[in-house]
Image (cartoon, rainbow, N blue to C red):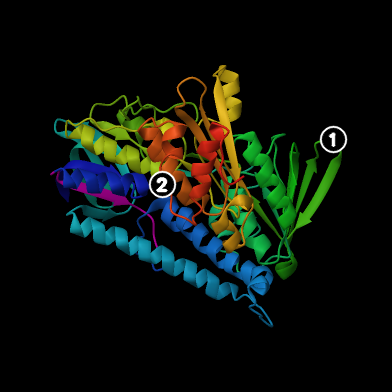
Amino acid sequence: MEKSFDVVVIGGGPGGYIAAIRAAQLGFNTACIDEWKNDKGGPAPGGTCTNVGCIPSKALLQSSEHFEHAGHAFADHGIGLKDLSIDVKKMLGRKDTVVKQNNDGILYLFKKNKVSFFHGRGSFLKAVDSGYEVAVGDDVLTAKNVIVATGSVPRPLPGAPFDEAQVLSNDGALRIPAVPKTLALIGAGVIGLEMGSVWRRLGSQVTVLEGLPTFLGAVDEQIAKEAHKAFTKQGLKIELGVKVGEIKVDKKGAHSQVTVAYTDAKGAAQTLAVDKLIVSIGRVANTVGLNAEGVGLKLDERGAIVVDDECRTNLPGVWAVGDVVRGPMLAHKAEEEGVAVAERIAGQHGHVNFNTIPWVIYTSPEIAWVGQNEQQLKAAGRAYKAGTFPFMANGRARALGDTTGMVKMLADAATDEILGVHIVGPMASELIAECVVAMEFRASAEDLARICHAHPSLSEATKEAALAVDKRTLNF
């Protein structure tokens, strides 16, 4: 059956479904294609983020944090517990319920905004006078504008394909049926640290193997050191500068193990045997099955779709957003690009400021940042001022019983414009929003320092860090 639309979006993840909704709001007859399935074979829009990424990982992080608090922190509050246990099956069931709620929410939003939804894999057929033909199952959709938002997939280690039983991607890491006694992670990035934190809290002995010589190299060095100290204290064993060699899966039923051979930072050969191995060494653009070559859609050497600054591809009327194009692989970056593209199709001036996209790692302590870090400013020769404020001097953090970390603010030495803010500590993911707003309005550190913040609140640490830029903190 052939159907005609103004806009067809291929992919229903954060970039895709948001692009479709915004296009519909702007008056376009819009369709969205997505192939994700739930355990019953039904549609499960939301992409990697909703199904095997952002949402389920946060659900498990919350559950595991409750468990750790119950086992270690409740006593400080005068709360006594006996025979503490974890029902992993129930925890995973709650995670699945949270995912389904998000899936269903997207389907509701499609219906509310009159977006036509097609369940299946979308692929280009050919260019036609009215735009492009896109196939999904037995349907052929025709659209003047096509937005590709097919996301990314995990990169496997050569010679160690994902079996999702012993060698796990982010997908399998979210479905481990019982707490493994030993767990290794290759890659100390966002996914590795978050999943390592989940299972470490529940009782696993976790080792993180990272090829780079520095920990969290993209993070401000001072913040990364504070985080490394906190994770090590919690029991995560983090080895840096390693070179991973052969990986063997020894299948012995319930006693199967994975053996990782590697060379440590000193050049010594090491062997690590674990129950489960999570490989988190990055992701690659998902363009398989799109038939990009059939319509001449240009891909780069990494397989990502080539776009300009406004997400236009080399084909007229074809756009691409999110993980499948250049830039950080972040759900909120994809959403902003999706909105911007829909508005550009409508003749408006959609805009995404890559300099103010926040980053968050949802460990405990949380890590969040926006803008440039101190290493980048030094490398660029930019004159700057820095101010820090520790959570140990924040009244709300003391009341919470979580005083790890700090807020760090960097401002231009001459103009005082905020150039970057870096946070490690409680609720950093929420605190960073104020800093993003400030940077969007090109605020100075003094602007934030002079804004009244509620007391007691964690946000006072942001105000104090701004005061520290001018060396005049009030509470430290």
Q: Residue at x 45, y 22 (%)?
A: 415
SS label for mark 1: loop
Q: Residue 28: image x %, image y %?
A: 15, 43
Where is residue 129 shown, x and y percent of the image?
14, 30
Q: Residue at x 23, y 49 (%)?
A: 21
In the displayed structure, 103 sits above or below 421; it is below
Question: Which is nearer the eye, 49 or 221?
Answer: 221
Q: 196 or 139: nearer the eye? A: 196
- The residue singled out by tag 1 in the image is 266
Task: Using residue 305 as the reference point, say whether residue 72 is left or right of it.
Answer: right
Membership of 35 in magenta stretch: yes
Q: Is residue 239 magenta?
A: no
Would you call the spot at circle 1 few (<14 residues within 10 Å), some (14-19), or many (20 or more)?
few
Position in image of residue 341 (x %, y %) = 27, 35
Residue 472 shows in the view: yes
Q: Residue at x 49, y 55 (%)?
A: 457
The residue that mark 2 highlights is 452
Farthest residue toward the top? 381
Left or right? Give the position of 372 relative to 203: left
Q: Position of residue 83 (x, y in %)?
A: 69, 82
